[in-house]
Image: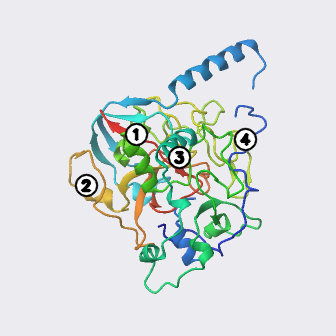
Amino acid sequence: MPLLVIISCSEPQKKDNSNIDLHKSNPKHPKACCEKSRAELILTQSSNSKTDTIFQESSNHLKKKIRDSMVLIEGGVFLMGSSDAKMALKREFPQHKVKVNSFYMDVHEVTNAQFSKFVNATGYKTVAEKPVNWEVFKKQLPPNTPKPTEDFLQPGSMVFSPQKGITNLVDFSQWWKWVNGANWKHPLGPKSTIDGLENYPVIHICYSDAVAYADWCGKRLPTEAEWEWAARGGLKNKVYPWGDEFLSEGQDNCNYWTGTFPTANSLSDGFEGLAPVMHYKANGYGLYDMAGNVWEICSDWYDERYYSSFKNKPIVDNPKGPKTWHYPIEPYDPKRVIRGGSFLCNKSYCSSYRVSARMPYSQDTGMSHTGFRCVKNK
């Protein structure tokens, strides 16, 4: 089970926070952070022209044809990690040469529609839909941590829910809340649904949920090396999937927090929360949303020191991550790597929509900004 939700804490709330619309779109667009765990939380308690219309219809038809498909990512060698000391964090250094074999990757993040098919076929229940087993969960906490209330051990997940009067960007409990009844079918709490959100990324997914779906599909989760190679889209040593400039001709390239995080969102990118898949342009490999929207779970264990282990190696052949996790801040809570950033990323707080950005993720904690996509061998 997830470790305490990391980044600021407060008493778990029983009420449904469905007043926060994670899928709210900007009326001007008619078509239209992050190191935290449940454990830590516990511990810290459209255009009018005919031409444009035809083009839009053609584009929509093409996207519908592509949806749910995979694309072949040819293997190659690249420099993994960052060379930008101004933006990157220590965990992104040093850069090291990596070889990746060819593989197939989903063109977009797994959607609610896709995950629904899996659940309907198998009867699978996600981690967020099950009560917390205290005997298992307490192993993720420091010794002698007192047992939380029964309310906190009920099925639920972490929901982004900013409150008024944000005082700092350190106490994450000001915008993350444990919500009983929140899960992939009820993303904001028991009163919310995914009706009309079939083509949005599935969220509140834990590592084991993603693995179960991938196994059912005959696929697997990507290694973070595969993920970064694919995200770069054929570009060499660029900051973003589309190049070095964050904005392109005045248009946003991904779904991120536009405004002042976490109190004011301008919606200039078209969305206050999640966006449907394939809304923004694909990268050079035909992959959508490799930046922003939702964090994507990788197969690797997380260890900030991992890149340093390659210092004396001229090239690393298909790395699959360290043998286990290492995260001193939460030493008992198993961490996986997540990539790509989410709709909550903002330049002033978390610029993790960069291709080299990597974060630790409590593998048993569902969150409203975390999803996944799958790969399979060539």
Image depth: mark 1 or mark 3 in front:
1
Which tag, 1 or 2, sits closer to the chain's start?
A: 1
Q: Which residue is mark 1?
A: 217
Q: Secondary structure at mark 1?
A: helix
Between circles 4 and 2, the one closer to the viewer is: 4
Cα distance between the residues tagged 3 and 4: 20 Å
Place of residue 331 in the rendered image (x, y in percent of width and height, measured from the top left): 40, 73
Q: Is residue 358 visible?
A: no
The quarter holding residue 263 reads bottom right
Are discs 1 and 2 less than 8 Å apart at CB?
Answer: no
User: Mark 3 = which residue?
Assistant: 353
Q: Tell me the residue that label 2 is attached to.
A: 310
Amino acid at dot 2: Phe
Secondary structure under tag 3 reads: loop
Q: Amino acid at mark 4?
A: Ser
First in residue order: circle 3 vs circle 4: 4
Residue at horizontal 60%, vertical 71%? 8
**How far apart in space, not on screen, are marks 2 and 3 (Cα)?**
25 Å
Q: Is residue 4 above or below residue 104?
A: below
99, above or below 149, in the image? above
Is 7 placed above or below 244 here? below
